[in-house]
Image (spheres, rainbow, N blue to C red):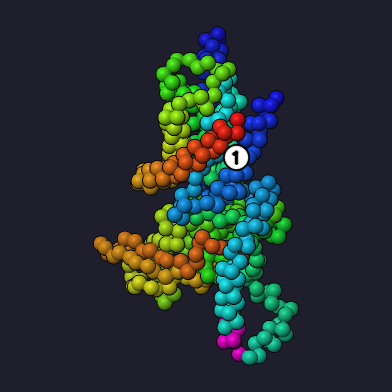
């Protein structure tokens, strides 16, 4: 007994160090896995509040870029509207009672308070949280493409698992054929992502457009992602396919959070299959 | 009492400067200097290390909270806090340190520089090693450690010079 006490007294700093280091390593391992309940996250009142203050200054430096992004998106949407028959707006008005019944997606605008792109596991912080109905695993996009998936949620803030994150896996497909693949990031260039698991039957060439596949409940089908930058075909398989994003991931301002009303139904259905 | 206020201010100040100013600075798009470890360098060297270890851990954890990085900053900062005393003894080639009168400002410049450089390299290596945590990324880890360390060391030396003059 005496020896144990002596041992503890002699090595008390070392033991204390080991204990704290163990805690830090547990947090690290937790952050490397795709968890939604991380203890260490920036979506709390203190860090969120400070980032809010910082952003209120930083916002001004990028206003021109953000305005252009929003203008581009507006023009794109107006062009879509212009392709509709002239009376479609009227028809929408008449159907107003039933629109909610058929509606699958709803969109919520948000501001990015913090945007990381130089690490391996990058996160964003946005200014909408559980008060505004944001839940984990919702898609986040802007006018030029996908940004990420909501991760941890607090009352007023949410962290977003960026597509520039080692854990991010997003279902995408080619625009001109229904071949699906997964979009990942190798941690090198923040505007170039990797398309993996694309079947060899898909014929691709440089400059082909990649869009979201709509196979997950997170992103609707057809959101633009990027174009194929280069690829290597060897041993009857694609060794690598690099995708250049339409977005500049270093300048992201206003974003949209997507709610999928059918998500719970689809997930409940999928659960019955796996059981 | 004066020491407590000074160290609290240093702690909060370093977290805020790191988060508000330095995390927005990216040299060449990906080098983010981390001079918040100044805390570990200038915290008074005392015989009782328990509080120092705890504060270093909390400092790293604060940075982690702000940057969603799990516990990598906490692990790295705690580690250099633990090796600080053995490292100082090794650099001074003395088995014991005269605790009440010792400050790192009294170190000759070259020894101070190697003290800072070793702590910074170790800290950054643990940080990026834990962040990437893959053997095939070892080159990225080394290059990031080396480049980031250079900027961190420059900032640390500048702030130490500034503090020395104000005394």
B124 lies left or right of A205? right
In this orientation, does residue A153 appear?
Answer: no
Query: Eyeballing the image, is A24 above or below A12?
Result: below
Q: From the viewer's perspective, is B139 left or right of B153?
A: left
Label 1: element kind: helix
Question: Percent from the top left, x then y, of residue A164?
Answer: 48, 57
Q: Which one is in front, B94 or A18?
A: B94
Query: Badge 1 local density, few (<14 within 10 Å), some, or many (20+)?
Result: many
Q: Where is residue B88 in the image (x, y as percent from the top left)?
A: 46, 23
Instruction: Specify the subunit that label 1 lies on.
Output: B
Quadrant location of residue B50? top right
Residue at the extreme right of the image, as rendered: A97
Q: Report x, y in % for residue A198.
A: 38, 65
Instruction: Give the residue at mark 1.
Output: B14
Q: Is residue A255 left or right of residue A117?
A: right
Residue stretch in magenta: A80-85
Residue farthest front in this picture: B165
- Residue B120: x, y in percent? 46, 36
Q: Which residue is drawn at 45% across and 26% down?
A: B108
- Residue depicted at x 56% and y 66%: A141
| Residue A57 shows in this picture | yes
At 59% from the left edge and 36% from the top edge, which residue is drawn?
B59
Residue A28 painted magenta:
no
Quadrant containing the N terminus of chain A in the rendered view: top right
């Amino acid at each position: 007994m005496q020896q144990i006490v002596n041992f503890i007294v002699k090595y008390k700093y070392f033991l204390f160090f080991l204990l704290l280091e163990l805690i830090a390593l547990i947090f690290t391992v937790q952050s490397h896995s795709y968890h939604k309940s991380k203890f260490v996250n920036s979506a709390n009142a203190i860090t969120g509040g400070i980032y809010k203050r910082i952003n209120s200054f930083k916002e001004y430096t990028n206003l021109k870029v953000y305005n252009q992004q929003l203008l581009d998106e507006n023009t794109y949407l107006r062009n879509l509207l212009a392709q509709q028959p002239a009376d479609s707006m009227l028809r929408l008005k008449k159907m107003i009672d039933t629109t909610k019944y058929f509606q699958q997606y709803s969109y919520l605008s948000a501001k990015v308070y913090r945007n990381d792109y130089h690490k391996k596991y990058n996160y964003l912080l946005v200014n909408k949280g559980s008060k505004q109905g944001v839940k984990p695993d919702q898609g986040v996009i802007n006018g030029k493409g996908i940004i990420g998936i909501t991760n941890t949620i607090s009352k007023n803030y949410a962290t977003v698992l960026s597509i520039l994150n080692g854990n991010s896996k997003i279902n995408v497909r080619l625009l001109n054929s229904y071949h699906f693949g997964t979009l990942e990031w190798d941690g090198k260039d923040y505007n170039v992502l990797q398309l993996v698991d694309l079947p060899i039957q898909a014929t691709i060439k440089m400059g082909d457009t990649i869009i979201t596949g709509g196979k997950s409940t997170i992103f609707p089908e057809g959101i633009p992602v990027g174009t194929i930058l280069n690829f290597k075909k060897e041993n009857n398989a694609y060794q690598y396919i690099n995708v250049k994003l339409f977005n500049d991931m270093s300048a992201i301002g206003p974003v949209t959070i997507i709610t999928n009303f059918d998500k719970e139904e689809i997930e409940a259905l999928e659960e019955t299959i796996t059981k | 009492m004066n020491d407590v206020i000074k160290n609290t201010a240093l702690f909060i100040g370093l977290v805020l400067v790191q988060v508000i100013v330095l995390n927005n600075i990216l040299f060449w798009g990906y080098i983010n200097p981390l001079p918040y470890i100044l805390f570990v360098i200038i915290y008074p060297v005392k015989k009782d290390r328990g509080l120092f270890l705890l504060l270093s851990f909390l400092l790293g954890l604060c940075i982690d909270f702000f940057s969603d990085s799990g516990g990598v900053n906490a692990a790295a900062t705690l580690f250099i806090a633990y090796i600080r005393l053995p490292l100082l003894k090794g650099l001074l080639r003395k088995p014991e340190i005269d605790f009440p009168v010792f400050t790192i400002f009294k170190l000759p410049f070259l020894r101070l520089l190697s003290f800072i450089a070793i702590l910074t390299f170790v800290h950054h290596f643990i940080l990026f090693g834990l962040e990437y945590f893959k053997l095939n990324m070892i080159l990225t880890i080394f290059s990031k450690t080396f480049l980031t360390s250079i900027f961190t060391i420059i900032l640390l030396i500048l702030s130490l010079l500034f503090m020395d003059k104000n005394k």
